[in-house]
Image: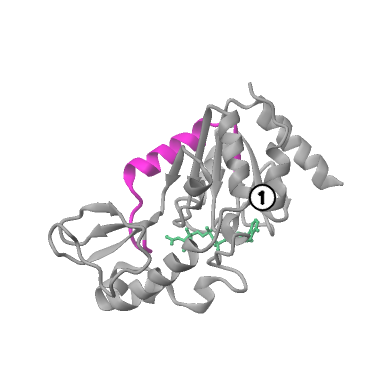
Amino acid sequence: MNRNKDIQRIRRRLEKAEKVAVLTGAGISAESGVPTFRGQDGIWKQYRTTDLATPRAFERNPWLVWEFYNWRRQLIANVQPNPAHYALVTLEKQKPGFILVTQNVDGLHTRAGSKNVLEIHGCLWEVRCTRCHTLSRNEKIELPDLPTCERCGGLLRPHVVWFGESLDYQLLNAAIEAAQSCDVMLVVGTSAVVQPAASLALQAKAAGAFVAEINLERTVHSGHLDVTLVGPAGKLLPQMVQVVSTQ
Ligand code: OAD
């Protein structure tokens, strides 16, 4: 009952909003079959970040790191965006001032059809040369054990942000700007523990936005936001955007 009221409340806010920002995390892709990082079956419960997701890990054992990323590329290539991704595509069509900030590197938002997306943790389908720094798109699933740069022969790495690395300055600034200028922010499927992404919701709130969180469980941010809807994003997000009228 309360949940229905909360959904109505969010819908009304979305209806009135000119600028809508959305922050997503691994939870939005969970219903597509992509494992999240934390929680019971989370990736970081089974593997250590220090073995797979730091620059030092890559220096020490690039084979192991590439094995992990090739496994994820394979897994993600075989799944589809879910109703939560599509709901955000619908919302973007309704709101010209829409911006989607994602921590996900799976590319599912773009595959679903979202356009204005900031992939602040990078993208699994892009690779970067460790020698000449050339960035390129690479959607081949069968990469060699150690892929090399076509231009200079240097070792390629996944174009994702690892622990201990900084986010792209321009992307982060654009995300902060979106958080600080939006009327409504939806925070979907993130545990809100990895900075600086986690602070975007609080920045939006501090700047006066209405901030609603959608998650399977309450998070460290829940008490500080306007609404926390507990439940699966694939079920809840479509209910929020279905009948939002265009401005
Ligand atoms: P986490 O795995 O930390 O959190 C996923 C969140 O999604 C949890 O709070 C779950 O309760 C929630 N969740 C799971 N299924 C859901 C569903 N169907 N509907 C709604 N919510 C659901 O993932 P992130 O917060 O994205 O960084 O993690 C942040 C960063 O930590 C990632 O980008 C990655 C990771 O290490 C890097 O790789 C740099």
Q: What's the residue at 66%, 50% (across, down)?
A: 214
Mark 1 CB lies closer than 8 A to ligand 1: yes
Q: Label 1: how many residues lie within 10 Å, few (<14), some (14-19) or many (20+)?
A: many
In the rendered structure, which amino acid carries the disc numbered 1?
Ile
The scheme the figure's colours follow is one colour
Q: Position of residue 97 (x, y in %)?
A: 52, 28
Q: Determine the residue located farthest toward the right in the rendered image.
A: 1
Classify residue 89 as left or right of residue 128: right
Q: Does the magenta segment cover residue 41? A: no
| Residue 99 seen from this side | yes
Above or below, comparing residue 83 to residue 246 in the picture? below
Above or below, comparing residue 151 to residue 242 in the picture? below
Q: Quadrant of residue 131?
A: bottom left
| Residue 191 seen from this side | no
Q: Which residues are magenta?
A: 162-186
Q: What's the residue at 38%, 65% (across, down)?
A: 141
Quadrant location, ligand no. 1? bottom right
Q: Does the magenta segment cover residue 163? A: yes
